[in-house]
């Protein structure tokens, strides 16, 4: 259910040709492939040739991706089940992003701050990172505090470092890529 592949070899030995051949030939059998980067520009033409979509992100480029976008609910999933799955997926993503940006695991109080901010931001539809960061730094006064949190000031303090780490995607060197509504 989760196949992975690693290919190693000398420069010019045909690693890229092998992988592009494997991927393109497996598509007719219903397999999917996700290529997380294309630094040499080899995969984008192949992707387009087989009817796929290449999301080209970069400073000054028009494509935006809201990493918190819920996507389309599968027909087989009930609405309440879909909401639970989306929330869990968003929390995993936010946790991974914050931990990667901070270079350490989140503390339990940071998990609480992220979850509280996500729930607040999601009340009005698909949340976006700017809303989430703002809500982490200035918790909403119209929502209940999570269990065990004494005050909004405490909640803000607990999530401050994680909020500033995520702010890098909003105000820092990665601003403009992941902080708006998805365009693709």
Image: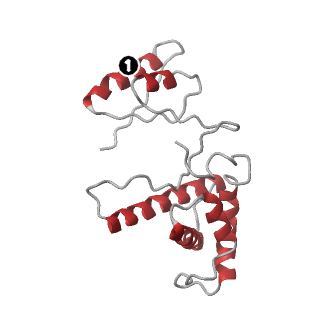
The residue lying furthest to the right in this view is 172
User: Residue, x 51% and y 36% (percent of image)?
Assistant: 36
Pick the residue in front: 15 or 130: 130
Indicate the quadrant containing the N terminus: top left, top right, bottom left or bottom right: top left
Q: Quadrant of residue 152?
A: bottom right
Q: Is residue 138 above or below residue 100?
A: below
What is the total number of numbered labels drawn onto the structure image?
1
Report the colour scheme.
secondary structure
- Find residue 142 and report its horizontal and vertical position in percent: 60, 82
The image shows residue 46, relative to residue 166, as above or below, that is above
Q: Nearer the viewer, residue 94 or 66?
A: 66
Report crowding for label 1: few under 14, some 14 to 19, many 20 or more residues within 10 A (C-alpha).
few
Q: Secondary structure at mark 1?
A: helix
Question: For mark 1, what is the residue?
Answer: 21
Viewer-nearest residue: 28 or 74: 74
Q: Residue at x 54, y 52 (%)?
A: 67
Q: Give the residue displayed 56% in from the left and 51% down from the top.
A: 66
**Residue at horizontal 56%, vertical 46%?**
65
Picture coordinates of residue 153 (x, y %)? 69, 81
In the rendered image, the residue lying farthest to the top is: 12
- The vertical placement of 41 against 106, above or below, is above
Please determine whether, in this image, residue 93 is positioned above or below residue 110: above
Is residue 79 shown left or right of residue 116? Answer: left
x%, y% of residue 58?
Answer: 65, 37
Q: Is residue 182 left or right of residue 24?
A: right
């Amino acid at each position: 259910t989760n196949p992975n592949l690693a290919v190693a070899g000398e420069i010019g030995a045909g690693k890229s040709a092998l992988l592009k051949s494997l991927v393109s030939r497996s598509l007719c059998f219903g397999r999917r492939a996700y290529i997380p980067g294309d630094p040499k520009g080899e995969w984008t033409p192949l992707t387009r040739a087989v009817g796929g979509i290449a999301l080209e992100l970069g400073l000054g480029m028009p494509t935006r991706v809201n990493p918190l976008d819920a996507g389309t609910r599968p027909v087989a999933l009930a609405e309440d089940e879909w909401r639970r799955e989306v929330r869990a997926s968003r929390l995993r993503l936010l946790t991974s992003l914050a931990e990667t940006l901070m270079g350490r695991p989140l503390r339990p109080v940071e998990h609480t701050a992220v979850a509280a901010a996500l729930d607040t931001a999601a009340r009005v539809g698909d949340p976006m990172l700017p809303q989430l960061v703002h809500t982490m730094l200035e918790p909403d006064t119209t929502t209940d505090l999570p269990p065990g949190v004494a005050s909004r000031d405490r909640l803000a303090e607990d999530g401050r470092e994680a909020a500033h780490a995520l702010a890098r995607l909003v105000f820092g060197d990665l601003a403009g890529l992941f902080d708006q509504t998805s365009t693709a």
